[in-house]
Amino acid sequence: MRKNGGRTTKDGIRIYQQADYAGMHVAGKLAARILDDIAAHVFVGQTTGEIDRVITQMVDDAGAKSATIGYKGYQHASCISVNHVVCHGIPGDKKLKDGDILNIDVTVIVDGWFGDTSRMFVAGKLPRKAERLIQVTYDALMKGIEAVKPGNTFGDIGHAIQVYAESQRMSVVRDFCGHGLGEVFHAPPNVLHYGRPGTGATLEEGMFFTIEPMINLGRPETKILADDWTAVTRDKSLTAQFEHSVAVTADGVEIFTLSPAGRFHPTYG
Ligand code: MF3
Ligand code: CO
Ligand code: CO
């Protein structure tokens, strides 16, 4: 028996209890607040390494822990993925250039609960094509979230994202997915960002997971660079990602990683 008496479905998905939502809210809110505050540190000439250093400090100042430092040998408090980097970009010495778009992904642990969120930023002036990609990716995430309610399936979430992205002539990355989280970082199920309605596990109140679609302007294929982390689009096309940590509630969805400053959407900054 788990310490809080929660159960696990036949698909291995943990069902959390009412009291667990509060812990997730605190963790999710901190991760989102860090992304709100990091916006001031994204500008032309800035390095992604310096952005990560500031994030590390923010996590520390909050009395929280980074979930990514030490995770499978990863050494940073964030992943920062610039332009054609799909995800898991490693912060480093490279300076941001005018018009670069970047995803910053932060996961914190507060009192044992994981908050995982990412969103898009721009250095300098946002190019027109990038703006459209970012908008479509944001809308795709929100359409996925709208499909979250008891009785729907994980396939319904993926389908909503895929249909929308492809209707805008963009492609959905297949090689990475969202994941269950809660008192662990990555738990079942794999939350695919494509799929068929009615397939996959059925959503139940008490399920906690991320939705984090990666959308490409070009083809969906990715490859991993020699550093064993950085995933890029094979065709070097521009890519974007947004991630929220969410819960299934009795009648719908609750988002743990809403921006306290209302800055999640790229044009609200
Ligand atoms: N935060 C990422 C996710 O959304 C995982 C990063 S793992 C790391 O699941 F080691 F690359 F940081
Ligand atoms: Co995640
Ligand atoms: Co993440």
Image (cartoon, grey):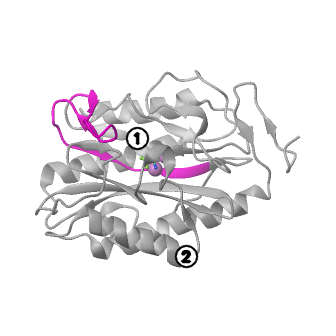
Residue 36, given in percent of the width and then of the height, sits at 41, 71
Whether residue 261 is visible, yes or no, is: no
Q: Is residue 26 left or right of residue 266?
A: right
Q: Which label belongs to residue 213?
A: 1
For residue 85, what is the image quadrant?
top left
- At horizontal 49% and vertical 21% (from top left) the residue drawn is 196
Identify residue type, mark 1: Pro
- Examine the rendered structure and indicate whether residue 33 appears above or below residue 5: below
Q: Which label belongs to residue 102?
A: none
Residue 205, given in percent of the width and then of the height, sits at 73, 43
Q: For ligand 2, tell me if the residue under mark 1 lies within 8 Å.
A: no
Does dot 1 land on a helix, a strand or a loop?
Answer: loop
Residue 41, given in percent of the width and then of the height, sits at 28, 74
- In front: 22, or 93? 93
Q: Which label belongs to residue 62?
A: 2
- At horizontal 16% and vertical 57% (from top left) the residue drawn is 100
- At horizontal 32% and vertical 71% (from top left) the residue drawn is 39
Is 230 one of the magenta-colored residues?
Answer: yes
Residue 187, given in percent of the width and then of the height, sits at 62, 38
Q: Tell me where the magenta segment starts and ends, as one range.
A: 219-246
Q: Is residue 98 left or right of residue 167?
A: left
Give the number of marks.
Answer: 2
